[in-house]
Image: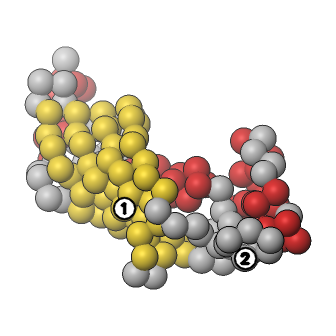
Amino acid sequence: MNTLNGYDYEDLQLGMTASYAKTITETDIELFATASGDNNAIHLDEDFAKTTPFGGRIAHGMLTASVISAALASRLPGPGSIYLSQNLRFRAPVKPGETVHVTVTVTDLQPEKRRVALSTVCMVQDKVVVDGDALIMPTSAKRREQ
């Protein structure tokens, strides 16, 4: 671990994994709508949302996916990492009050640029709700020496 309590590129190994969990609250959904400008009724209007196939309000897909960012920033690779890209597949809705469990796993190390690729999976109970992969520039002991 480095001084930020994260992993430098040089510490990473294929197959390393970390998890993070967050319960998505009504307040989270409302604040995300305010911050993003996404005021879709499926997220904010229970009466409307009851008429949809979901039977009620659901969290923004990007709010759910943002829990991946928290896992990457706080667990693996950790503080100081820079998010370069993320592919996402939205598999199922998340409802207010549900807890999203994220697991990130190192799948590729790119020594020429000191980048790391990770699989990213968000689950609610035993159901995958979002998955994909991320490319991250973690901190690097060698970069600090240069």
Amino acid type of the residue that numbered disc 2 sits on in the rendered structure: Gly
Cα gap from disc 1 to disc 2, whole angstroms: 25 Å
Q: Earlier in the sequence, mark 1 or mark 2?
A: 2
Q: Nearer the viewer, residue 108 or 144?
A: 108
Residue 73: x %, y % from top left: 42, 49
Q: Is residue 26 left or right of residue 83?
A: right
Mark 1 crowdedness (10 Å alpha carbons): few <14, some 14-19, many ≥20: many
Residue 35: which disc? none
Query: Where is mark 2, residue-wise?
Result: 55
Compared to residue 129, the image places residue 135 above or below, namely above
Q: How is the image coloured?
A: secondary structure
Q: Nearer the viewer, residue 96 or 78?
A: 96
**Relative to residue 45, is residue 134 drawn left or right?**
left
Residue identified by numbered label 1: 121
Q: Amino acid at mark 1?
A: Val
Q: Position of residue 142 (x, y in %)?
A: 16, 28
The quarter of the picture where residue 80 lies is top left
Q: Nearer the viewer, mark 1 or mark 2?
A: 2
Element type where label 1 sits in the image: strand
Mark 1 vs 2: CB contact within 8 A: no
Does any portion of residue 84 appear in the rendered image? Answer: yes
